Amino acid sequence: MPKHYRIGILRETKTPPDRRVALTPAQVVEVINKFENVDVKVQPSELRCYKDEEYVSLGVNLQDDLSDCDLLIGVKETKIESIIPGKAYMEFAHVAKKQPHNQKLLQAFAANRNTVIDYEYLTDSHGVRLVAFGHWAGVVGAYNALRAVYLKYELGQLPPAHTLHDYDELKGILKTIKLLPLKFVITGGGRVAGGAMEVLGQVGISEVSHDEFLTKKFDYPVFTRLDPWHYAKRKDGKPFEWDYWVSHPAEHQSIFLPYTHAADVFVACHYWDYRAPHFFTVNDMVHPDFRISIIADVSCDIPGPIPSTIKASTIADPFFDFNPITGNEEPAFSGAPNVTVMSINNLPGELPRNASEFFGRLLIDKVLPHLFSNDSEGVIERATILKDGKLTPRYSYLQDYLEGQNT
């Protein structure tokens, strides 16, 4: 690390705009005080949930030109035109799964000899992620599922989360919600699913076992949560093993179909490997027993394991209908046989102040100490996709993607 290390906090340039920030004003001050010889500059932004004045009031320097910084920190992907050659970037790059829409971004970073550190792959030695907005994605995703229920079942309207000041105000809304006896299924076992369960719990939706969910009728709303071994099995018939699932996801097949016959609402909070099986097919969706009418796809992998997620929706326009007969998008809540989809890919942006504070806390406690040391545990190394414009060994499988293939 240089004698004097400069971090630049980027203004978000992705469209649609994102109001989150990696470090709040108070957290910037904490970083400067906590880590020796570290300085932080903040790029001014009119959109950020924390105003420029909130940084200035705490003595933080605003600086439009960050070319003198060693590391540039953002949240979402950097706009290609704003890339500063030779700099290190830390952000959610969304390239490691060969996402088609970001192929040119990886190529631009490589051409500009950039180092790219992806938040998603900052993990401990056991592979557990260290920083994420996942909890807040789950919170807002589940709330948007409830908004969709209210609209689809003509129960009224719930205010969008982004129109509320913070989570405390949203909690007040949750206390007023009254639902029909619907069944919700949640996939995933991490922070995202935890956030979704937190919201459903505050509404008073009861958790039931998988067997009860599949076999019983209820006169009140219920949910169940599935881990990977509940929705996938090995093709060779051997018992599910976590390590084998992680290393050989393609050697599994989906066993999720029974839940499509029992659930009304699917809140997808799982982590998906692009080699893993899909949950169901479009043909499954046209089967008379397919019951799911609302899918809140918090994971939002495109293309991915949920065939109705044909695009990312937006905070401004969160819902659309998927017609499984035609395979086309139709206006939201336009009736049978359509499935209503919510697939916002920046859900925590609806509660940006809460999400930013939560994320920055993790960044300070779990990542920056490794960045400002010799990284003896390999935390930064594991998340570095490009080093000075070259793919690191861990991400060498992206070479064809970087060269313009797999488009």
Image (cartoon, rainbow, N blue to C red):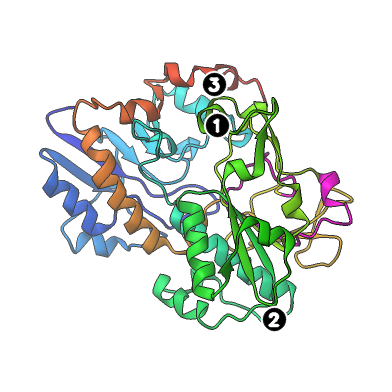
Q: Sequence-wise, which precedes: disc 2 or disc 1? A: 2
Q: How far across and down, in percent of the image, does residue 87 sit?
A: 33, 29
| Res. 2 image quadrant | top left
Label 2: which residue? 155
Numbered disc 2: secondary structure: loop
Q: CA distance from mark 2 to mark 1?
A: 43 Å
Q: CA distance from mark 2 to mark 3?
A: 47 Å
Q: How far across and down, in percent of the image, does residue 315 sit?
A: 57, 61
Mark 1: amino acid: Glu
| Res. 6 image quadrant | top left
The residue lying toward the viewer, choosing from 207 and 216, is 216
Kindly identify the residue that appears in the image at 23 percent across and 25 percent down: 376
Label 1: which residue? 241
Q: How far across and down, in percent of the image, does residue 188 sit?
A: 55, 48
Q: How far across and down, in percent of the image, does residue 113 sit?
A: 40, 21
Mark 3: amino acid: Leu
Numbered disc 3: secondary structure: helix
Query: Is residue 17 shown to the viewer in this render?
Result: no
Label pair 1/3, CB-CB below 8 angstroms: no
Magenta segment, prevailing SS (helix, strand or loop): loop
The residue lying toward the viewer, choosing from 233 and 369, is 233
Magenta residues? 282-308
Label 3: which residue? 398
Look at the image and tell me in which quarter the C terminus lies: top right
Does residue 373 appear to the left or right of 366 in the view shown?
left
Q: CA distance from mark 1 to mark 3?
A: 27 Å
Residue 19 drawn above or below residue 274: below
Q: Residues within 10 Å of mark 3 (few under 14, many from 20)?
A: many
Does residue 306 appear to the left or right of 205 in the view shown?
right
Q: Residues within 10 Å of mark 2 (few under 14, many from 20)?
A: some
